[in-house]
Image (spheres, grey):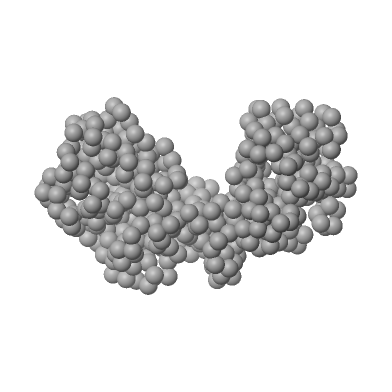
Amino acid sequence: MDALNRSTANVNTYTERILQFGEGNFLRAFANWMIHEMNKKANFDAGVVVVQPIDQGLVKMLNDQDGLYTLYLNGIKNGKAISEHEIIDCIQRAINPYENFAGYLANAKNPDLRFVISNTTEAGIAYNANDKLEDAPQKSFPGKLTALLYKRFQEFNGASDKGLIIIPCELIDNNGENLKRIILQYASDWNLGAGFVEWINEDNIFCNTLVDRIVPGYPRDKMDAITKELGYKDNLVVEGEQFHLWVIEGPASVKEEIPAEVCGLNIVFTDNQEPYRTRKVRILNGAHTCLVPVGYLYGIEKVRESLEDNVVGGFLKDAIFNEICPTLDLSEEELNQFSNDVLDRFRNPYLEHALMSISLNSVSKYKTRVLPSVLEYVKRKNELPNRLLFSLAALIAFYKGERNGEEITLKDDEKVLAFFKTQWATNDLGKITQAVLSNTDFWATDLTKIKGLQNKVEGHLSAIIGEGMQKALKSL
């Protein structure tokens, strides 16, 4: 059986216009797939040169396959469960700067280079005071990028049209701004001059981004069947869900250079990504957090099964559409579309997402993902969000640590677990509710001060403990 490479596959070659730091599953199933789509449908002609950001990586394996790999997209598409696959051919070559730093820096001389994309983990956009310009390579990703940008500045004598559009995908707030800040710090540390600083500020665009696609990665347990289906050997197969969202915050000129709209890609160009980040945290992440204690105490194990149950699924839909969406500022059409996409993602038959696997640190998750919706709902409606508070009561019951007489393996900070253990030892629901809601270490505010909230949560908790989750939820 042939191995996948450019001599065995009928694929295209593109102009090297994108430098990509990171060769992992996420970028290959997310950004590279979108680039592939734009190459096919809009003549984007954007080839990718991949840079291995750390000492150990997949660059050799990627070069062995001439940058090619097969992507499987599995999930709900247009209302139907679909699994589809194709060979992605936008990666032209890959470089390990730890073995060939000169080859890495040579990309600075490419007049066609226009974009930089990165995903170097959340810790990747970080300042390393030990990095020096003469290092080969610098240890940090921002250090490596600064060295390349300075080389480009020198090569083209600071030409304004040779600046780059830099689009980091690391999961930190204001990723573009933080990356630019560190690069300017290196410019100062390394005495790169006022001209270079001006070129960075005036001629390079650093975009903040929000990325969203679940990427399970390499399907190791299914590779025998996949290889038989494909008819060739591919060591870099990657799986992702159908849903994708890329929010890119930057000037309008960025949208003009990326033909996403004509390809039907869910790329949002905006001058303010915050409403989209808030939407994701409150609807997607908030719904997960609401669901965990309710679904698990109800007797359900998986996210998908929760949506298939009329009672639990109905609870979650009501929480999203009637109590979370009204707290957000985007249009009703946008919110409904995103909410329906989230529910489709939860229903994905190709992903088995265990409720217990997302129960880690549920208290802090409720604080950041759900509590803002509770507080905003009270502010806007002057009433209490019944289902979000039922979920809070379920969370308190969940931290009792048992379901139908069996122990629940709780995973949280030791202080959190010790607190709940002490409270549940009293077995006094009123005292437990009061202690939890007034714990400012949990919520950064005293929730008992909100009129009626303590009574509401205590009532729900009493029903859950006294009648069981199934009866309590059905009578909600």
* Residue 300 or residue 82, whichever sits in front: 300
**In the displayed structure, does residue 117 sit left or right of residue 368?**
left
Picture quarter containing residue 1? bottom left
| Residue at figure coordinates x 79%, y 48% from the top left | 452
Report the label total: 0
- Residue 427 lies, with reference to residue 454, above or below; the image says above
What percent of the width, then of the height, locates residue 426?
84, 29
| Residue at figure coordinates x 48%, y 60% from the top left | 244
**In the displayed structure, does residue 437 sit left or right of residue 351?**
right
What percent of the width, then of the height, locates residue 13?
25, 62
Q: Residue furthest right?
A: 466
| Residue at figure coordinates x 81%, y 57% from the top left | 476
| Residue at figure coordinates x 68%, y 62% from the top left | 322
* Residue 27 or residue 256, whichever sits in front: 256
What percent of the width, then of the height, locates residue 422?
77, 27
Residue 244 in view (yes/no): yes
Residue 100 in view (yes/no): no
**In the displayed structure, does residue 316 sit left or right of residue 228?**
right
What percent of the width, then of the height, locates residue 97?
25, 39
* Residue 464 or residue 279, whichever sits in front: 279
Picture quarter containing residue 99? top left
